Every structure is written in C-alpha cells, then in structure tokens.
Image: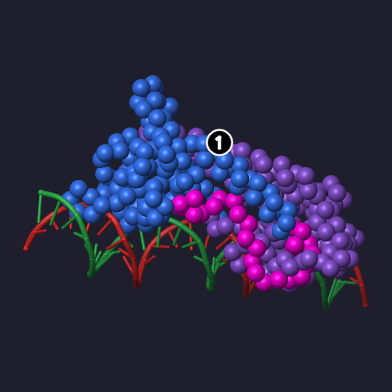
Chain colours: A purple, B blue, C red, D green
Amino acid sequence: MKRNNKLSLALHTLGHMAVAPDQALTSEVIAAHNATNPVVVRRVLGLLRVRGLVVSGKGHAGGWRLARPAVQITVADVYDAIGAPLMTVEPLAAAQGCAIVAALHATVTEAATEAEAVLRRHFARRTIADLAQAMADGARGKSSAQGKGDLHFPPR
Amino acid sequence: MKRNNKLSLALHTLGHMAVAPDQALTSEVIAAHNATNPVVVRRVLGLLRVRGLVVSGKGHAGGWRLARPAVQITVADVYDAIGAPLMTVEPLAAAQGCAIVAALHATVTEAATEAEAVLRRHFARRTIADLAQAMADGARGKSSAQGKGDLHFPPR
DNA sequence: TTTCATGTAACCATAATAGTTACGTGATTC
DNA sequence: GAATCACGTAACTATTATGGTTACATGAAA
C-alpha cells in the first residue's frame, strides 16, 4: 500500500469480515491480502476498535472481527473512525488582516462544508453488508470485478 | 507558504489584482505578500496563464495582471486551472479481482463525484470580483478580517 | 546597453504517510 | 506451566509530495 488510503484498507477488510462474520482474521492475513504490513493493519483497525466497529482478540483463536452485524455498520462510521476527512478547510491561525483572505476563506469553507456533507450523506446510506453483498453478486455473475488492491485518494 | 495550497495563493492574488486591475504585480511583490518565493508564484500563476486567466509581461513595466475583467473569472476557473481536484478517487491499475474492492470503489467514486460536483457548483457561482468586493466592504466596516495568510487543505 | 522581470530547470528541505523492527502482554493449547 | 500465537505499541526508516532555493536564459523597457 503505497500512497494510499486507510479508508480503503478498512472498508475492504470489513467487507471480507462481513462475508464470514464468524471467522476472525489475523493482522497477518489481512496484511497479505492488502500487500501491506501487519502493524499497519493493526494501526488502522485499532481506530475502528475504539469506535466499537470491530473487536480484536489475542492468542490462538485471536484476530479481528466485526463488533456488530454488518448491516449496522455504515461506510460513514468507518469514514469517521478513520478521521481523515477528505474535505475540510482549516484556516491557519496567524491573522494577516487581509479582507480578501477572509472572503476567500469564507467561500472555500462554505463550498467544502457542503461537499463534505454530501459525501457523508452518501456514505451513511451504505453499509458494510452492501459491500459483502456485492461480493456475493460478483461471485455469481460474470463478476465485473476489475478492481485493484487499493483506492487512491489524491495527494494532499 | 508551508504545507498549503496553490489555490489559496492563486485566489488571494487574483483578488488583489481585481482591486487594482491596471497595476501589474511582480512575482516578488506577490511572493512577499504571501510569505513565499517568487519562483513559486510564477509556477502557480503560470498555470493560470495557460488557461487565459492572467497575462504576464517581462521587463520594466512587467508583472502579472488579469487577462479579463474580474467579473468574468470564476473561482471554478481558477480551481480548474490549478488542476488539483480536492475530491477525486483514482483507482490504481493493478487488478486484484476482488469484488469487494470493486464495490468499494464504486461506492466511493459515486460519493466523491457528487461531492466534487457540489464543490464546483459553488465555485462556479463566485467570481474574483466577489472577492475584491469583500475587500472593499472590509475596508469600510469594522472589517471582520481575521483571516490568515493561507488556507490549509488537509494533507493527502 | 543596462536593468528589470518572467520562464524554467535543477536541486534541496520539509513533512506526511507507510513500512519495519522489536518487544511487551495476554490468551490458548499442550 | 511452558510454548505458542496474535495483538499493542514504541521507535525508527523509507518514500513521496510539496514547497523553497539557486541559477541562468530570454525578452522588454528605459
């Protein structure tokens, strides 16, 4: 996972968990499936754990699994847990007293705020179960799965 | 300008140009006003020039100025010229044949596409003249300008 | 012809992100 | 209860995107 996103790793993994909710997945397996490192997986899933989306267990039957039914976990939940809003404008503190900068900031903030809202609204309507469903559908039909290992959000 | 955005530099500068359209601004002056380097200014404004938003001149009376009236330049024009869309999801090429990744990608792309559209719609409604107007307004009233030198879009 | 300002290439600095190594802790199995 | 397994976390390294800097060529005006 080079220059990619925690969000895609998280959603991808939760999607797989939803397919087989009873089976715990180890960081190592997940990492291999995502061409990344177990520690990175733990870091990302750790963010989901504190939000109560997944649970982890140590020892022999250890690993990660969903904390509740996939239907009850929305993409927005995951998005929020990751905590890396795609669309926020944070003004830096140091004032400069330039009215243009203020106007500029107002305009951009307003636009970004609404765009972010639209994004979250979409995400709130999708659950992890929907992703798993797509997997089932794909397995049946011709499977238009030409996806790749990661999604890529623009460099910030 | 550390860890900031070309967009804010561009909009800020065009805003000032709109206030005094007949006066050419040199890269050096602009850079000083933005706590950055003249070369950086040229790089950014160069993007606007190829889109016909500004013109530049060499020599003694040289510098940068708007290529057309500020009312005819929207924030969206600038946003497009900068070419760093805030909201795009580009799938990496390497397929992995995982249906979940495909579903994931579809969901995120759909959401991001609409959010981006909302963003551009906002930007298309604002012109550089509006920013300059804010400056005029600010000069009169108490000027709620507490802005700062730059805006900051999230790290990508 | 001198000076000023852009145009551009090339390189350096910084910071954000991911990848790695290492080791501690608790749970399970033998 | 000893061995093993898997997470939890700290600390460090690697990579990469972005800006900053230097240097110099080009062209326009005084």
Residue A18 seen in the current view: no
Say whether residue B116 is left or right of residue A14.
left
Judge whether B105 appears above or below B117 on screen. Answer: below
Give coordinates of residue B127: x percent, y percent: 45, 37
Magenta run includes residue B88: yes
Q: Nearer the viewer, residue B40 or B91?
A: B91
Magenta run includes residue B55: no
Give coordinates of residue A155: x percent, y percent: 55, 58
Magenta stretch secondary structure, dominant? loop
Q: Amino acid at mark 1?
A: Glu
Tell me which corner region of the image, top left, top right, bottom left or bottom right, holds residue A112: top right
Question: The numbered mark 1 sits on a residue in which chain?
Answer: A
Figure quadrant of the N terminus of chain A: bottom right
Give coordinates of residue B74: x percent, y percent: 46, 41
Say which residue label 1 marks: A110
Give coordinates of residue A100: x percent, y percent: 40, 35
Judge whether B138 appears above or below B49 on screen. Answer: above
The residue furthest top is B141
**Magenta stretch bounds:** B80-104
Residue at 61 percent across and 45 percent down: it is: B117
Residue at 29 percent across and 51 percent down: it is: B56
Count of numbered circles in the view: 1
| Element under disc 1 | helix
Residue at 33 percent across and 40 percent down: it is: B17
